Image: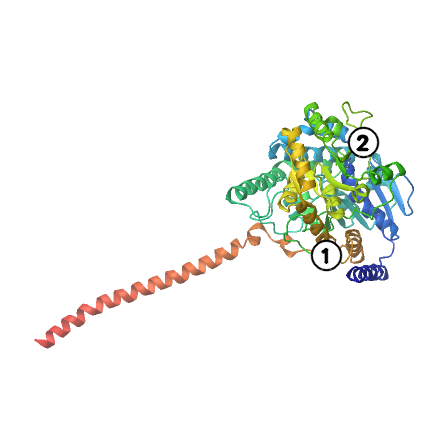
Amino acid sequence: MMLARQSKLNMFMVLLSYLYATDGARILGIFPMPAKSHMIVHSALMKELARRGHEVTVFSPFPEKFPIPNFTDIEFKLSYSELLQVSVPGMLDMFNMDKLWFFQTEKIFWDIGIGLCNIFLQDDAIQRLLFSSKEEFDLLITSAFTYDCVFGMGYKLNIPIVKICPFGGREWMDEWFANPSPYAYVPEILQEHSERMNLWQRIHNTLTEIHAKLGRIFYVIPQHDAILRKHLHSNDIPSIWELQKSTALILFNNHFSTSYPRPLMPNMVEVGGMHISPPKKLCADLQRYLDESSDGVIFFSMGSNLRSSNMKNATRNAFLQAFSKLKQKVLWKWETDSLPGKPNNVKLGKWLPQSDILAHPNVRLFMTHGGLLSTQEAVVRGIPIVGIPIYGDQGYNLAKIVSAGIGIKLDVANITTESVLWAVNEVLNNPRYRENMQRLSRIYRDQPLTPLEQAAFWTEYVIRHKGAPHMRSAALDLSWYQYFLLDVIAVLSLVAACVLSAVFLISRAVIRRISYITPRIIVHGSKKNN
């Protein structure tokens, strides 16, 4: 009964959104980052906007395989490995990134953003869009990753900007909206802290955020400004410090149920899991394999950027030996044609429809690197997790998984046959992990609109209201000393000092007067008595 009522409410809200639909707008999407997982999120919204009748043009390394009505692709030919070679030459293998300090990881992301800006802004298609194309657009949608130079495109084209953050956000994104982000309980996503930090964790969280802020002030933004002025052929373009304040909206691929509650301005909207659609029919071979796995299936995937085939031999062999001792079947995303030593209960696939596989009732466990899209899909499908974080926000995501009691985390540097067997058997045989995951799945899915419907609504809201300047916080126009009330504190301190000084002076004068009068009274009284 409740589900039926919820379904009717969803239908009503969707019909209402069409009733107040925006006339077809011309929308430009700029997504040059060659990270497939990021594009999965971005693409979901862009295709939904095209479906709603908007004319959508998308610049990215991942053109659609089949034509879509109202959707135009501009292919940007750049691979992830090519970007790393240009931006971070000599970078470690990605499976070794867990050994890096936070500061080293942060520097890699900064350099990737700087290198990417240098590459894509000089692309012929981008130069035509900026300088010679007769096309006009109503909105620019782009990623909120590390390439801040895109703010300059919004300025040049004179259109509002909507940002999509493919993860839970960073503190410097709060600066775009003057959104408070207290270090005391908002953890940095490149760390494994929760919102309940002890003293040393709060010190660590504060230092990492200060490092990130100083790095942007003295390293990142100056280089992005220089790149922007070079490729836009103008020295009059405002600094990104100013341009970023014009961001109309940011959509976070996040949800408080799978992360932590935190302050958000009205133009900062959580739409976590908007890439997840109802499960689609599997191919016959995969469907049969899952249907026939009466003892259950363990699905193992390290995501789209990490390749399981690049694992160290010792790590790979530990997994293989552990899997050979299980009665369950293991479906492993493996990127090469063969896997030496593969047990009979292991099936390989170069590409596997992850979300659809997790929806199959015989899937009992998901082994993952802990990427945000993967953990969100596991939550939606209600499948407990064994996670092996490597870099980025994966450790942060899995820290939440562990604290919520829906999975176990393994350290990739210490993988052994025994540790894999213990983790897999603990999650499979202890019912609390599945029960906790089912409960969290219900909480996550209890929303008035789907995440994709919310994302489309707020994007069209920005179009309807010409950038929605009424959602912009006045805090963006305050100087730092006004924002922190230092001028108010100074004035009140001055007033308090003046009052205290006056009280002191008056008190001292009264005491002096009393001290002067009292002896005279005593002397006068003595004379009378005599």
Q: Position of residue 128 (x, y in %)?
A: 85, 39
Quarter of the picture containing the N terminus is bottom right
Secondary element at tag 1 = helix
Q: Are circles 2 and 1 on residues that touch, CB within 8 Å?
A: no
Label drawn at residue 264: none
Give neighbour class at mark 1: few <14, some 14-19, many 20+ (Cα, 10 Å): some
- The mark nearer the N terminus, 2 or 1, is 2
Q: Quick one: 489 or 523, which is closer to the camera?
A: 489
Identified at 72% across, 37% down, the residue is 367
Residue bearing mark 2: 347
Identified at 80% across, 50% down, the residue is 139
Q: Quadrant of residue 482?
A: bottom right
Quarter of the picture containing the C terminus is bottom left
Q: Is residue 129 visible?
A: yes
Q: Eyeballing the image, is 22 above or below 343?
A: below
Q: Position of residue 361 (x, y in %)?
A: 79, 45
Q: Position of residue 393 (x, y in %)?
A: 67, 39
In screen coordinates, is 351 left or right of 217? right
Label drawn at residue 469: 1
Q: Position of residue 402 (x, y in %)?
A: 63, 43
- The amino acid on which the numbered mark 2 sits, given as a three-letter code, is Lys
Q: Is residue 121 visible?
A: no
